[in-house]
Image (cartoon, rainbow, N blue to C red):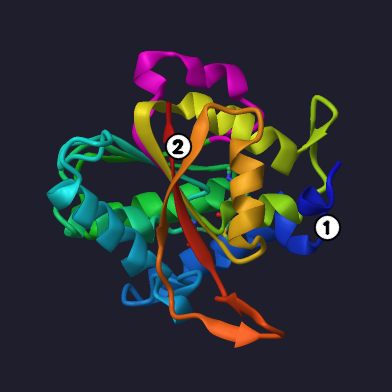
Amino acid sequence: MSDVEQLTSSKLGTKQYWDEFYNLEKNNYAENPNDSGECWFSDSGAEEKMVDFLVDEEEQGQGESLISLDCKMCDLGTGNGRLLFSIREGGFTGHLTGLDYSQPAVEFSTKIAEQEEMENITFEHADFLGDAAMWSTGNRQWDVVLDKGTLDAIALSDIKYEGKTGVQTYPHVVQHMVKTRGVVLITSCNFTSDELVKIMTTDTCLKEWKHVKYPSFRFGGTDGSTVCTIAFKKE
Ligand SMILES: C[S@@+](CC[C@H](N)C(=O)[O-])C[C@H]1O[C@@H](n2cnc3c(N)ncnc32)[C@H](O)[C@@H]1O
């Protein structure tokens, strides 16, 4: 395993942590419907940046990718589903799917979708890394696959999939979930842009396509930002 893939495991990499986390968030929401819970990377405005990227590509992309108003999108490790709700509010009308291996997260996002009358969105209980064979047919492939913070959580897990770490498994599964000319849009705080590109493009049919810009700082002679968002395209 390369240095890029090796992160120390932590409780954020366990299903039990996420089950407890989303059970609590679900209960908070039942008491106060204005509280739809944690928005990961809100300090960086990552959710807005991802939605803006999709909107800009739809408006100006000139058919370079499969991003269109009615395209089908899938959010990996969707949590409370907020990213998908924001995408819908951004004008995208196609079917949206949120996957999560935490059943409380699925119940929570489904509840919010009902309350907010969000249509044409499905939340499914799945460990997408464990169900790799599911993602090779047309109706189980998407135009756009999204990830905000899920690869980061997977990198903190010590679960093995047929002897491989989650990070080693991830790009090889995700490349089958997206259609040719489709886009995988990932936001990470645990990996630098260079590391994320290496993880996603080594021995896969995913190509580094576009980087979303964030305000950067300069430290020790190197430019950096707290998160990175990169779009990969399947060729
Ligand atoms: C840091 S949270 C991010 C949640 C959401 N994307 C957001 O931005 O609010 C990581 C999410 O990934 C989910 N997750 C982690 N590993 C997973 C796996 N192998 N399959 C499906 N979901 C997973 C967790 O249950 C959790 O909801």
Residue 12 highlighted magenta (yes or no): no
Report the residue at 32% width, 77% height from top. Answer: 34
Q: Is residue 210 left or right of residue 120?
A: right
Q: Answer with left or right where residue 25 lies relative to residue 20.
A: left
Judge depth for marks 1 and 2 and give the one in front.
Answer: 1
Q: Secondary structure at mark 2?
A: strand
Q: Earlier in the sequence, mark 1 or mark 2?
A: 1
Eyeballing the image, is 222 above or below 210? below
Q: Quadrant of residue 156?
A: bottom right
Res 122 seen here: yes
Q: Position of residue 81 (x, y in %)?
A: 39, 55
Which residue position holds label 1? Answer: 9
Point out residue 42 in the picture as x, y percentages from the top left corner.
Answer: 44, 76
Front-lying residue, 132 or 50: 50
Q: Is residue 127 visible?
A: no
Residue segment shown in magenta: 126-146
x, y percentage for residue 117?
Answer: 18, 54
| Residue position for label 2 | 124
Q: Residue at x 27, y 52 (%)?
A: 54
Q: Is residue 142 magenta?
A: yes
Q: Quadrant of the C terminus?
A: top left
Marks 1/2: CA–CA distance? 26 Å
| Callout 1 secondary element | loop
The amino acid on which the numbered mark 1 sits, given as a three-letter code, is Ser
Three-letter amino acid code of the residue under disc 2: Glu
